[in-house]
């Protein structure tokens, strides 16, 4: 996994984009069911849609929060 020097939340990203473009970007949290319904609405079958929504929820709660030095090492 390649990461940068710090972990970022979706809110951090929205704030960084807001600062860069000068227009407010909002971060909205969806429940697992809402997210699964959105996936299903674009054609993903219900079971995979629910799995993806649960994975998104886990990520939002830190499941993928890790830092590596690979990007720094590769670009140095």
Image (spheres, grey):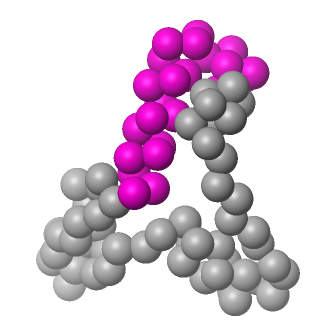
In the image: residue 62, left or right of residue 72: right
Measuring from the top left, give residue 54's x and y in whole percent.
45, 35
Which of the 4 quarters of the picture holds residue 11? bottom right
Measuring from the top left, give residue 62's x and y in whole percent.
34, 60
The answer to whether residue 75 is visible is: no
* Residue sitting nearer the eye, 18 or 32: 32
* Residue 4 within the magenta-colored segment of the rendering: no
Q: Residue at x 72, y 81 (%)?
A: 18
Specify the quadrant that holds the N terminus: bottom left
In the image: residue 39, left or right of residue 67: right
Which of the 4 quarters of the picture holds residue 71? bottom left
Give the vertical position of 32 relative to 40 (above or below). Answer: below
Q: Residue at x 71, y 30 (%)?
A: 38
Q: Which residues are magenta?
A: 39-61
Measuring from the top left, give residue 42's x and y in whole percent.
72, 22
Measuring from the top left, give residue 69's x and y in whole percent.
16, 75
Which of the 4 quarters of the picture holds residue 40? top right
Main SS of the magenta segment?
Answer: helix
* Residue 52 within the magenta-colored segment of the rendering: yes
The answer to whether residue 9 is visible is: yes
Q: Residue at x 48, y 69 (%)?
A: 9
């Amino acid at each position: 996994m390649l990461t940068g020097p710090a972990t970022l939340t979706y809110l951090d990203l929205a704030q960084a984009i807001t600062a860069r473009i000068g227009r407010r970007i909002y971060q909205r949290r969806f429940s697992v069911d809402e997210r699964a319904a959105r996936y299903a609405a674009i054609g993903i079958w219900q079971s995979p849609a629910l799995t993806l929504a649960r994975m998104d929820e886990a990520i939002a709660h830190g499941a993928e929060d890790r830092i590596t030095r690979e990007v720094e090492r590769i670009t140095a």
